[in-house]
Image (tube, grey):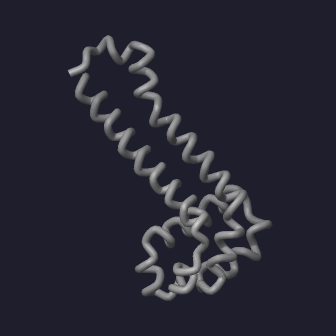
Amino acid sequence: MMAKSFWYSWLGFVLAASPLLLGVINLSFSYYLSRRYLREMLEALQRSQHFYRWAESLPYEGRLTHFFMLASVRGSMLWPGPAVRRGFLSSEDIDNFPPHLQRLLTIRNWMDVVLLTWGSIMYALLKLTR
């Protein structure tokens, strides 16, 4: 068990505030991906029923819609099976998706895993010391 005085130190503050910092970094990286690579991702998915119209309306959409579009692309590329079975996503698009974009989506997914793991560890430690 950690002493309660540890959480009042600077190291304890940094450890407890780090999930917030990781969340800001995740949002910043999502913003970067949605502004820089979303059009390229949508063009790579042009044979898919769900995504082929989005590339045309992309310049007229706001920031929040870009985040939602990026989340939809991330989800479809992370678990493509259900989208392919429903006909929303083409299996050719999955096979031909550019590797550098797939790597960026993988980085973003791992950032989520790190954020959730670190946040749950900090929550558990804070609950144990009360």
Q: Residue at x 60, y 65 (%)?
A: 101
Compared to residue 108, the image places residue 19 above or below, namely above
Q: Quadrant of the N terminus?
A: top left
Residue located farthest toward the left when viewing the structure as drawn: 1
Which residue is situated farthest in the front direction here? 99
Res 41 quadrant in image: bottom right
The residue under the point 66% across, 82% down is 46
| Image x and y of residue 128, in percent | 23, 28
Vertical placement of 7 versus 84: above or below?
A: above
- The residue that appears at 51% across and 54% down in the rendered structure is 107
Q: Nearer the viewer, residue 33 or 49?
A: 33
Residue 58 vs 63, above or below: the answer is: below
Relative to residue 58, is residue 28 drawn left or right? left
Q: Name the residue at 62% across, 45% down.
A: 28
Callout count? 0
Report which quarter residue 81 is drawn in.
bottom left
35 vs 126, nearest the viewer: 35
The picture places residue 5, in percent across and down from the top left corner, at: 32, 11
Quadrant position of residue 93: bottom right
Q: Quadrant of the C terminus?
A: top left
111 with respect to 1 (left or right): right
Of residues 56 and 104, which is closer to you in this image?
104
- Report x, y in % for residue 65: 66, 62
Residue 3 x, y percent position in the rendering: 25, 15
